[in-house]
Each structure stands twice: as C-alpha cells, then as structure tokens.
Image: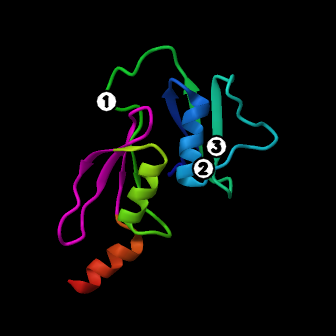
Amino acid sequence: MTVRIRHITVDCAKCYDLSLFWSALTGFRENPDDPNLPEHVQAAIEAPDGSAAMLFVEVPEGKAGKNRIHLDLQPTDATRDEEVQRILGLGATIVGDFRKEDGTGWVTMADPEGNEFCVERSATERAAGRAAS
C-alpha cells in the first residue's frame, strides 16, 4: 500500500514571511478564498494543480535543531546553477557547495529561517551527463 504526502508542515517563527519565500521559490500559491495574512499563526500554499501543499505554523519555541525540514529540489525549466542564483536573489544562503568539475553534485542552501534544502541538477542536465558517459 502507498500513501501520498498532502502537506509538508514547517514549524517557523514567521509563517507569513516564510510562505512568501517558498511561494516565490516553488510557484505554489495561497488559496484566494482563504488568503494568508501577516497576523495569522498559520499560512498555507498549494501547488497549482492542488496535488501538494506546504503549511507553515508559527511556534513559540526557538529552532532547537539543525533543520525543521529538508527538501531536495530539482529545477524544471532552468539549470541547477541558474536556479541557485535565482534562489539567492529570494533571500536564501548557500550552506554547502558540492558541485564537481564534471557538472555533477548539488548545492545545499538555507531559507530565511535557516531550514536547509538542496538544489540538484535538472532532469535535462542529468540526461546530458548520462549521454556523455
């Protein structure tokens, strides 16, 4: 039996701000019938096709561990390096750079609250790498 992940929930300090960052990054959007507001303690964004969502919940406790979430992202319409530059422009930082001279590898980044995620090569880049082998 299999299951589908409907929501990824992220504990955070400022749910509205973090939802804006992840919305800009992923293209997920808030529900226009139930908009996110800065004074709310929860904010949700959903994939355009409704297949998945992210829920941000404000918690009073400070971040105690290294991560609250960890996602591996694969660009759909850009190269890994182009996507890294775009994400830096959204306010993320680079935590670790594991790109190799042969084009393989990934970049570990952190969102504005320090939650880490990796940016991998796009499917096109992966296919080109396999073809060159």
What is the CA distance from the residue labelled 3 to the residue labelled 2? 9 Å
What is the CA distance from the residue labelled 1 to the residue labelled 2? 25 Å
Check disc 1 and report the residue beneath it.
66
User: On the rendered structure, is 96 left or right of 123?
Assistant: left
Q: Residue at x 57, y 33 (%)?
A: 17
Q: Nearer the viewer, mark 1 or mark 2?
A: 1
Q: Are marks 1 and 2 in contact (CB under 8 Å)?
A: no
Q: Residue at x 41, y 50 (%)?
A: 88
Question: Is 3 situated above or below 35?
Answer: below
Question: Is 97 situated above or below 32?
Answer: below
Q: Amino acid at mark 3?
A: Ile
- Quadrant in which the C terminus appears: bottom left
x and y percentages locating residue 108 in the rendered image: 31, 48
x and y percentages locating residue 92 in the rendered image: 41, 43
Q: Nearer the viewer, residue 4 or 58?
A: 58
Check disc 2 and report the residue beneath it.
52
Question: Is 12 situated above or below 128?
Answer: above
Give the residue furthest to the top.
60
Give the residue furthest to the right.
33
Q: Nearer the viewer, mark 3 or mark 2?
A: 3
User: On the rendered structure, is 81 left or right of 57?
Assistant: left
Q: Nearer the viewer, residue 51 or 62?
A: 62
User: On the rendered structure, is 6 left or right of 74?
Assistant: right
Q: Are marks 3 and 2 in contact (CB under 8 Å)?
A: no
- In the rendered structure, does residue 33 fall within the stretch colored magenta? no
- In the rendered structure, does residue 100 fall within the stretch colored magenta? yes
Disc 2 on helix, strand or loop? loop
Q: Amino acid at mark 1?
A: Lys
Check disc 3 and report the residue beneath it.
45
Residue range (magenta): 94-120
